[in-house]
Amino acid sequence: MSWKNSLRVMRKTLALTVALSATGLAVAQTTTASSATPTKVPPKPPSVFVNQRATDDPRIGLKGGLYDAGQAASGLQLLISTPKPAGFAPDLDSIKAIDATPPPPPVDPDAPRQPGAARPAGPRANYGGTNSDLAFNSKYLFNGNYNGINIYDIADPAHLKLVTSIVCPGGQGDVSVYGHLMFMSVEAANGRMDCGTQGFATAGPEPTPPAPTGDAEKDAAAMRAFRMRQPPPSADRVKGVRIFDISDIRSPKQIIDVQTCRGSHTHTLVVDPKDKDNVYVYVSGSAGVRPSEELSGCSGGDPDKDPTTAVFTIVVIKVPLAHPELAKIINSPRIFSDPQSGKVDALWHGGNHGDGTQTTSATRGCHDITVYSWLGLAGGACSGNGILIDIKDPANPKRIDAVTDPNYAFWHSANFSNDGKTVLFTDEWGGGGQPRCRATDPMAWGADAIFTITPDKKLKLASYYKMPAAQTDKENCVAHNGSMIPVPGRNIEVQSWYQGGISIVDYTDPTHPFEIGYFDRGPVDDSRPAMGGQWSTYYYNGYIYGSEIARGTDVLQLLPTKYLTQNEIDAAAQINLPELNVQDQPHIDYPMTFVTAKAYLDQLARGTSLPAEKIKAMASDIDAKNAKKLAADAKAAEKAAATAKTSADADRLHGLAKILAGGGSAAVKAGM
């Protein structure tokens, strides 16, 4: 969020301005002289595979518009798009008035600037409260927003029904649910303990940025301090995590605010399989450190001089399930430290990686952490680094490995494959508010980076993937939040790309990811930049839900294509989770059913590990439920696994053999 927006939201009765992702703050944290002015040297070719940009794609050239934009889709069908409700919705009169004015001159986000100068302005915010992250329980969808949370009944996903709106400003409104509890991130300066919309009084006029002096390092530090400055202290302000009781879904009650020194840009709910009495919350804050006059104990000094600095750490909150009102901070682990020297800021310090490389933000905190409790691991996307974390003791997470990347600007989020052998990181180049999917933008910048996890728990880069359809300079676009689609035998992710829409990527072979489906709209406004697009796009119990920043909430369904069959779609739909918080990634135990078996057969038909006539015969035997033939088929599948052309095919054949040998009668279960 820019400094002007930070002050503006305190003046408004209701925060209807769209705040840019606070990653923009983190991008400004680079401190080396080399990072002050972007290099003009062409980007170096990536060292691993990156998919190619599409040259002839239906997504190119779509008509713009808030609610009447052109659409293009493959493998996805939009079932319903529900506009944001009152208190969150765009101000249509304001938009109309602004559209009647001449468009501003175009701004090149890559244009060189003086050391320490301000970054290019983000798009004008006229589209109401920013829709943000999503969470689910079996009956309801929770759509976070910078102004609060909207809760929808999803009993019939094609007919989404608004149940409750909680107007509670504070941004980003990152949301999680667990049983009767709901958690909400608060980071903006207008967050009040009482959820009030009146904000806070300001002290004097808006200050101006510091003038450049010519000393690149000092100017960058001065600009960082200016952006991270804090408003006057208030005893009524909250920055941290709100906890609500949602036992009565139509009337949620706020239980407690857990205050933190840097607020909560995002948070991750952590469920420890060994601890039935508590849940944990990992808090990632990226705001400036609050003054101690507002929250006792907060300090943000240089870690070499200030050992208690609130920077270079995450926050761990423990929530007793029987008494959530007793939730409190129990740890601030130094997961960026050097274990030998104890230096707490031991990871990437900011800057580029040489000529033709990206300028990577300094690692001062994490943007997002995805935990995979099934393996006791977490993937941390932490500004300048991607890190692997041991969370077997969730109260005391410990870093296992850390990587940086010459093509990455800002490590943003992470997702694991179901087997835990691969992790997909995203790069939010430009902070989410810039057009980073233009035809001139490098395909390895603002992209996914796919890493394999070695047996000794090291991260090894395998490839990059970027949504392939070029977008306009009016569309903010870069890699953002996504989730696994639970198709057995494959690693498939559905992912949001802001105004680049939704892209479905298959990374079963982590060295060669490819797109298998998409949904996109034209620009929110094709005459000038406007903040919009998909913030989060997640699969839940047979449907895909999208949080569209400006337009509302989308529900989509998968359609069969040559890349994804109906059998595979049906196999994924077997998985029914009681809850889903994507950053608390569930492990899926795929049911040993004939539905799963047919999905494996369709996948084997794309390769050469099993002859086509044998695949056809096995499918026929499944339909006929011929026990004798199925037993023989099981032996044949197991034998074929020994000579399979790929490890993925070998796994499919082993799984197929078990199902056929068992008669496909295993009960369907979710598998957490």
Image (cartoon, helix red, strand yellow):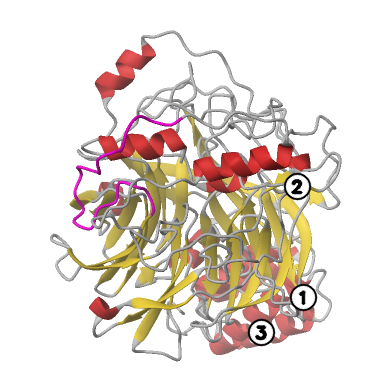
The secondary structure type at the circle numbered 3 is helix
- The CA distance from mark 1 to mark 2 is 22 Å
Tag 1 or tag 3, which sits nearer the N-term? 1
Residue type at mark 1 is Thr
Q: Is residue 392 above or below residue 122?
A: below
Which mark's residue is nearer the viewer, 2 or 3? Answer: 2
Mark 1 surroundings: few (<14), some (14-19) or many (≥20) residues within 10 A? few
Q: Is residue 445 above or below residue 127?
A: below
The secondary structure type at the circle numbered 2 is loop
Residues at marks 3 and 1 touching, judged by CB atoms closer than 8 Å = no
Question: Mark 3 sits on what residue?
Answer: 634
In this picture, which residue range is highlighted in magenta? Answer: 187-207
* Residue 15 horizontal/vertical position (percent): 28, 39
Residues at marks 2 and 3 touching, judged by CB atoms closer than 8 Å = no
Instruction: Tell me the chief SS of the magenta region.
Output: loop
Residue 442 in view here: yes
* Residue 349 horizontal/vertical position (percent): 71, 55
Q: Residue at x 55, y 13 (%)?
A: 105
Mark 3 surroundings: few (<14), some (14-19) or many (≥20) residues within 10 A? many
Question: Mark 2 sits on what residue?
Answer: 407
Question: Mark 1 sits on what residue?
Answer: 454
Residue type at mark 3 is Ala
